[in-house]
Image: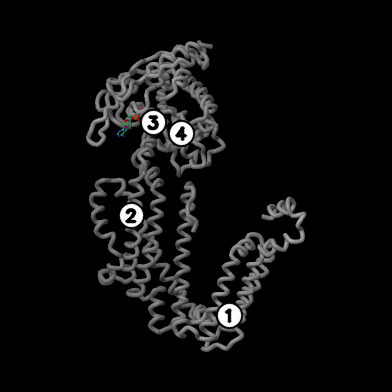
Amino acid sequence: MVEAALAEAVTHSAAGAALDIEQVSHAFDIDGAELPVLSDVSISVEPGEFVALLGPSGCGKSTLLRLVAGLDKPRAGALREDEVRIKSPHPSRVVVFQDPTLFPWRSVWDNVALGLEAQGILKSQRHRVDAALDLVGLADFRNAYPHQLSGGMAQRVALARALVNDPKILILDEPLGKLDSLTRITMQAELVSLWQRKGFTTLLVTHDAEEALVLANRVIVFSDRPARVKADIRVDRPYPRHRGDPYLADLRRQILGLLGLDVTW
Amino acid sequence: MSTYSLSDGLASGAPRVSRAPLLAWVRESGAGVAASIAWIAFGLSCLLWEDVGDWSRTHSLGIAAFIVAAVALFGTVGADYLGSAGRALRQRAAWLVALGAFLTLWELATAKFAWLPLPFFPPPQSIIEVYTDDLPKLLDSVFASVKLQLGGYLIGAAVGFLTGVSIGWSRAVGYWVHPVLRFIGPLPATAWLPIAFFTFPSSWSASTFLIALATGFPVTVLTWSGVASVSSAYYDVARTLGAKPSFLVLKVAIPAALPHVFVGLFMGLGSSFAVLVVAEMIGVKAGLGWYLQWAQGWAAYANMYAALIVMSLLCSGAITLLFAIRDRLLVWQKGTVKW
Ligand SMILES: Nc1ncnc2c1ncn2[C@@H]1O[C@H](COP(=O)(O)OP(=O)(O)OP(=O)(O)O)[C@@H](O)[C@H]1O
Ligand SMILES: [Mg+2]
């Protein structure tokens, strides 16, 4: 079973891209004062790896994801996708933002079709939109408008909108944060199986140490703002993982300790 | 509707059979009966007394009032057999009462007892007379007004929309157009009237220009503010999905700004009506504004009221049409205003 999962991940690893974050620093100007947000962050992600980013609120995780997406340029350092410098957004790196930001004037189906339409390939690829909607379980809501969806459903549409593009790097900013715990566990399992099947590289920001440990190969813990890499933890456990696994519980305690929480439970 | 009252009756109607149906009947048809009484009163007010003036349609108007009364009575009492038309009639029955009462009072105050000074307050039958006897001229005027208004409004709306999008999108265009807009825009379009009428080759082109100007300013400003206020998160999403600048304008900025654009279109419609009427009164020798002016010259007060009623129907119709278009295009919005 371990071998099977591993073999699958390896055979599909060509679908994922390598990501190199090299000594990246970033800051914002607020009222003339400089607010440093990222400080000398270096992370090297292998193709097909699933990396979770954990850190205190406001430390700079979303900022780092915007740099990886190419939406902003870092003040110092460089980011590379498969050795190529990231200068602007590209559909090979798709982001699911913290907020679903669905386009309210488009139906669910049209929202999911957005990427294919923007790239001018929608006509021949309509089936991919249907497949993505099936995947997140919202095929029945294809004609609904965003204001008719629940928060969790909107987040799932945002996920489908990203997945339909077959990204090489999937960038997730707390995509499961708004879901109820039941849907959340289902979606976590979906995400893992999807990642294993497609082999894209995944970058997941989360507040939840347990979620990070259930999903990722690697957990990176950031310090308070400005974010520095505080710990880089490998999670060598086969999938599907069990929440009660004592090995994971041990790692969880360790991570919460790094985040400044002394847990005894 | 019918299933609703049926289950109602099954659930609670049995013990108080004797009183409930009468009450329900009064509640449902009372207003209809009252409406028919009001219109019978109007009909009688036409026929019972002699007119103080010389009007030819008094008798026909009285008969017409009785017909309305009959329709109101049978329409509301028998509404259950008339489907949606019956339901609509029932809903408006209270208005029919008010209208009948108003017409009765109007008839008595003008044609019968002359409580109101006469040439200035014509009776209902003299307005009817205008519609029957002066119809060709009135129709010509309507046609001329609609043609002028439609041309000017469409040009103004299109130019305003394109200008607004360009200012909202491009800094360079904004640099040049914004000051011009600030300087010229707030000027009422009617202030251009004297200049426009001798610089343009025809009074018709001058009026078209003025109507377009009155429409264009609010449409430009609101389109611009709509485009400028689109959340950058939408652009971020589109850009990470591979959108090019043309896609960002056509598929993100414009649809997101559309609710604002419609506010501008409504404002433009209002101010262009004002320009239309003034332009017709002063320069163009056609249209409802000109008809009003002409009627005033002949002290034909009934013609003025008749033209005013037509004008208000046209303006209201135009607004209704714009609302219908908006509701179609903006189905995705929740809680829009009902006109
Ligand atoms: N566009 C911006 N302009 C100015 N400051 C910003 C901007 N975006 C983010 N910041 C600041 O940068 C810091 C990091 O923000 P960021 O959104 O990256 O945090 P985060 O780690 O994602 O937090 P959370 O977990 O709460 O989402 C915050 O203090 C925020 O105020
Ligand atoms: Mg964040």
Q: Nearer the viewer, mark 1 or mark 3?
A: 1
Residue B61, labelled with which disc? Answer: 1
Q: CA distance from mark 1 to mark 2?
A: 48 Å
Q: Disc 3 residue type?
A: Pro
Above or below — where is A51 with respect to A147? above
Q: Earlier in the sequence, mark 4 or mark 3?
A: 3
Q: Residue at x 44, y 35 (%)?
A: A100
Residue A188: x %, y % from top left: 50, 24
Picture quadrant where residue B96 is located = bottom right
**Tag 4 near tag 2, CB within 8 Å:** no
Marks 1/3 in contact by CB < 8 Å: the verdict is: no
Q: Amino acid at mark 2?
A: Thr
Residue on which disc 2 sits: B220
Q: Which residue is mark 3?
A: A91
Q: Residues within 10 Å of mark 4 (few under 14, many from 20)?
A: many
Quarter of the figure that contains the N terminus of chain B: bottom right
Residue at 40 percent of width and 45 percent of height: B256
When asked about the image quadrant of residue B244, the answer is: top left
